[in-house]
Amino acid sequence: MLKRMCVGLTLGLGLLTGCAGYYEIKEPAVTNYLPQERGAMAASKPAGQSREAAREKPLSLEACVRIALAENPAAAAASEGVAVAGEAVGQARAAYYPEIELHSGYRRFQNHIFLPPGLGGTLFKAPTTIGPLNDWSEYVSMRYYLFDSGERRARLLEAKAKLGVARQEEARIKQDMVLNVHQAYYSCLSSIELRSVARKELVRAEDHRRLAAQRVEAGVALQTDVLRAQVEVSNLKLALLRAENIVRISRGNLNTSMGLPVETPLEVEAPSKTPVSPNGINIEEAFEQAVQRRPEVRGALLNISAAQSGVEEARSAFGPRIRAEGNVGRRDSVFWPNDKDWHIGVFVDWSLFTGFSRTHGFAKATREVSRQEAETRQLIQIVRQQVWTAHSRLLEAFEAVEATRTLVKDAAESMRETRQRYEAGTNTITDLLDSQTSLVRAEANHVQAQWDYFTSKAEFDRATGLLAANDYTR
């Protein structure tokens, strides 16, 4: 009998092991997640509308941000994170409701019983076993905790705090997304304007080449002047090709920051804003504003609240738990049970000794609060340092705009005078090309300084918590 049981058990385990081999991980196809053009199924979705908007007309900065908030997968992931935390709150709240379960089962058993000797007397021998018997049962049971020393309350408060953390994390991700769009947008505008500068300088260089050729024909200049001018034209043609490629790359970066396919054709419009001096910014007020508004700081404070709730949960393990239980059903030795079977009662559970597990758990939760508080203090220092750095860069960017504006004006005047002197024969082609190179450099620096200013302004607004995604969803 024992041998047959061992053989059967071995065969059963072998069958289960073989079946387990059929369960393999199904990796989803990467094509399901590639950026795709708007199709028939996406036509009714607001996100699909934003893709169409990217093709219709030149996009403003606000339009680019709105598209990013609708299309970028990072925004969707952040929103799903909030939804996950919200469901965790529902799970924690479920502990306040009773648990109701339906049970149905069958077993066959034989048990040994212990009876006093001589219980049957001389007439019959008392039985020593019960069974073998069939045991069929079906019943409904309910359990409800009347008192749990504050465990449910602590878990619910912890879940709510973590929901707040998820919301602040969503706000942080969206603010970073808005900043990325600002940076990509201004970089795209800068590359387009630098391309215009390159085209204008190429036209100017070709004009200088014609001027040199005219002077050679007039016999007042050497052929080397034409060759020098031709070399400059070739260099500027190469610079224009590079500028064209930078525009192409910057448009792809802007598309990616908006969550669109990198190859999506788009045009952007330049804002009609002018740089404003940041000298009037009160840095102390900026520090306070950043600490109060930055979602990272608010999330850190909520992490402290969650850790404090964890302390209350650990403390509850030292107290008793009182629960009410009951079930009602039928139980019998036949397939359809006939005999009623029920019970109801109140039970108290109180762990007296757990190997100091509760003590260590409480100490761990207390240390976690201290760790979260220390990280919050460190985070506030980092936030203040970010504001300080962003403000310094904004000051530098504004001064660079003013300096390059004057530089362009002086270089243009120098270029005009040098050309006049070259036409009069008092300057060489080298002087003319040098002044042209200085003007090209000054104009490029001014363009770069202007858009660097707006990028620095966006970074300062992000550092102080002003670059909120809500401002673009109203």
Image (cartoon, helix red, strand yellow):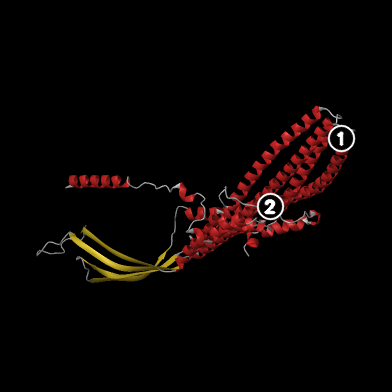
Q: Nearer the viewer, mark 1 or mark 2?
A: 1
Q: Is residue 266 above or below residue 313?
A: above
Q: Are marks 1 and 2 in contact (CB under 8 Å)?
A: no
Q: Residue 370 versus residue 94: which sits nearer the camera?
A: 94
Decide if residue 349 is on the left or right side of residue 381.
left
Q: Residue 428 versus residue 329: which sits nearer the camera?
A: 428
Circle 2 Cα neighbour tier, 10 Å, few/some/many (<14 / 14–19 / ≥20): many
| Quarter residue 109 falls in | bottom left
Mark nearer the N terminus (1 vs 2): 2
| Residue type, mark 1 in image | Tyr
Q: Is residue 39 above or below residue 429?
A: below
Q: Residue 54 versus residue 18: which sits nearer the camera?
A: 54
Label drawn at residue 383 = 2
Q: Position of residue 14 (x, y in %)?
A: 26, 44
Q: Residue 462 versus residue 472: which sits nearer the camera?
A: 472
SS for tag 1? helix
Measured Cα–Cα span from mark 1 to mark 2: 56 Å
Q: Is residue 298 above or below residue 146?
A: above
Decide if residue 336 is on the left or right side of residue 80.
left
| Quarter residue 145 falls in | bottom left
Q: Position of residue 357 (x, y in %)?
A: 47, 53
Quarter of the figure that contains the C terminus? bottom right
Q: Position of residue 349 (x, y in %)?
A: 41, 63
SS for tag 2? helix
Decide if residue 182 is on the left or right side of residue 78.
right
| Quarter residue 175 falls in | bottom right
- The answer to whether residue 83 is seen in the rendering is yes
Residue plotted at (72% across, 47% down): 193
> To which residue does mark 1 refer?
422
